[in-house]
Image (cartoon, rainbow, N blue to C red):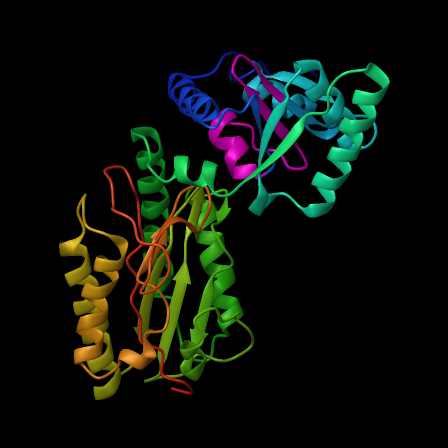
């Protein structure tokens, strides 16, 4: 069989812009290179979508260390990378590559790199330095540097997220009229995934939450064998993954008649969401946005049941920066950021 021709023979224009952004960051932090151990970071910079691989970007070069399983995939998706195929431990091939670049200050994302990985790499680099008579490279722990670069999306990313949203909405519309009392949560979750895939999604962006009745009070519930019942809330929390990019949607559904209390809570949550959406614009802060929605819910008497944050960034990861919540870091929203707006009221046991 003739192998497919590489889809990417050189870095696309939007990738080159990202490379420059990262290299400017390297200069600012006085680093010779940056290790990429978090798959979404590597995909963002290279289009490579394989697992068990590590990238290393320097001022001039971009290296990918992977294994035989991903050799052809790497050539197809990112044929312009300097490719190293390991035939043993990742750390051995990685340390050899790093030594060949003569990098002395190497950054890594501490929140996406295990202690074991860094300890093994540090040991291997020291062994190489001893045998070659050179200096020992310094491994510099960093936090959220790549996540902060990724939180402002370019037009290409915005289009992909929009498509992921469209697919998720269409999938829900397709199953909405098929929902019946007596079906299990698990069955509906599976039906939703099938509709997502049939519309071009590579997968759900996270395991769909389908929560019937009192299960809807559990924000991160896992669907099971509970049966859908008439006149009871049925919560859907789902999203599509399209070309790596995620969407995240929530809907509350009732078969039959919703009680007065369900209608009241729905109205309050909807008002909180709409007020927050109207408020969002460049220059407002994440804390201010959360406060707008929280005020609506608190005035209605449900403040203690809105325990999570208003929303979060979304992109190659389902949860990205910035986060909009009542505590923690506060930052200004900027053009190009994509955030979810998902206030909620969760009454225990209801």
Residue 179 in the image, given as x and y percentages of width and height: 39, 70
In this rendering, would 107 be left or right of 94? left
- Based on the picture, tell me whether residue 55 belongs to the magenta stretch: yes
Q: Quadrant of the C terminus?
A: bottom left
Q: Is residue 8 visible?
A: yes
- Corner quadrant of residue 82: top right
Compare residues 166 and 107 and report the one nearer the observer. Answer: 107
Residue 20 in the image, given as x and y percentages of width and height: 41, 19
In this rendering, would 259 be left or right of 37? left
Which residue is depicted at the point 37% across and 68% down?
A: 308
Which residue is depicted at the point 19% across and 67% down?
A: 272
Rendered view: 332 above or below 216: above
- Based on the picture, tell me whether residue 292 belongs to the magenta stretch: no
In magenta, the rendered stretch is 38-63
Which residue is depicted at the point 74% across and 34% down?
A: 121
Which residue is depicted at the point 66% across and 32% down?
A: 53
């Amino acid at each position: 069989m003739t192998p497919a021709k590489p889809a990417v023979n050189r870095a696309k224009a939007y990738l080159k812009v990202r490379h420059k952004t990262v290299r400017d960051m390297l200069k600012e932090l006085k680093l010779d290179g940056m290790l990429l151990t978090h798959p979404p970071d590597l995909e963002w910079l290279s289009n490579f979508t394989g697992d068990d691989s590590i990238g290393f970007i320097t001022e001039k070069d971009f290296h990918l260390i992977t294994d035989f399983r991903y050799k052809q995939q790497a050539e197809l998706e990112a044929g312009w990378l300097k490719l190293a195929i390991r035939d043993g431990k990742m750390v051995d091939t990685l340390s050899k590559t790093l030594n060949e670049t003569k990098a002395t200050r190497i950054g890594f994302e501490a929140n996406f790199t295990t202690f074991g990985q860094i300890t093994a790499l540090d040991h291997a680099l020291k062994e190489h330095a001893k045998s070659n008579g050179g200096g020992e490279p310094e491994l510099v722990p960093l936090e959220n540097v790549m996540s902060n670069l990724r939180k402002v999306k370019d037009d290409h990313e915005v289009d992909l997220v929009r498509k992921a949203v469209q697919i998720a909405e269409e999938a829900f519309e397709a199953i909405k009229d098929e929902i019946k009392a007596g079906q299990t949560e698990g069955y509906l979750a599976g039906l939703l995934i099938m509709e997502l895939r049939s519309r071009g999604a590579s997968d759900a962006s996270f395991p769909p939450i389908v929560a019937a009745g009192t299960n809807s009070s559990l924000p991160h519930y896992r669907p099971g064998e509970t049966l859908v019942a008439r006149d009871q809330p049925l919560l859907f929390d789902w999203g599509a993954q399209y070309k790596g990019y995620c969407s995240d949607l929530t809907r509350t559904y009732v078969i039959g008649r919703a009680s007065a209390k369900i209608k009241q809570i729905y109205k309050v949550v909807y008002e909180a969401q709409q007020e927050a959406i109207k408020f969002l614009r460049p220059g407002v802060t994440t804390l201010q946005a959360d406060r707008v929605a929280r005020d609506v819910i608190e005035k209605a008497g449900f403040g203690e049941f809105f325990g999570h944050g208003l929303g979060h960034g979304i992109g190659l990861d389902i949860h990205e920066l910035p986060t909009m919540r009542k505590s923690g870091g506060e930052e200004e929203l900027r053009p190009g950021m994509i955030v979810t707006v998902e206030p909620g009221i969760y009454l225990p046991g209801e």
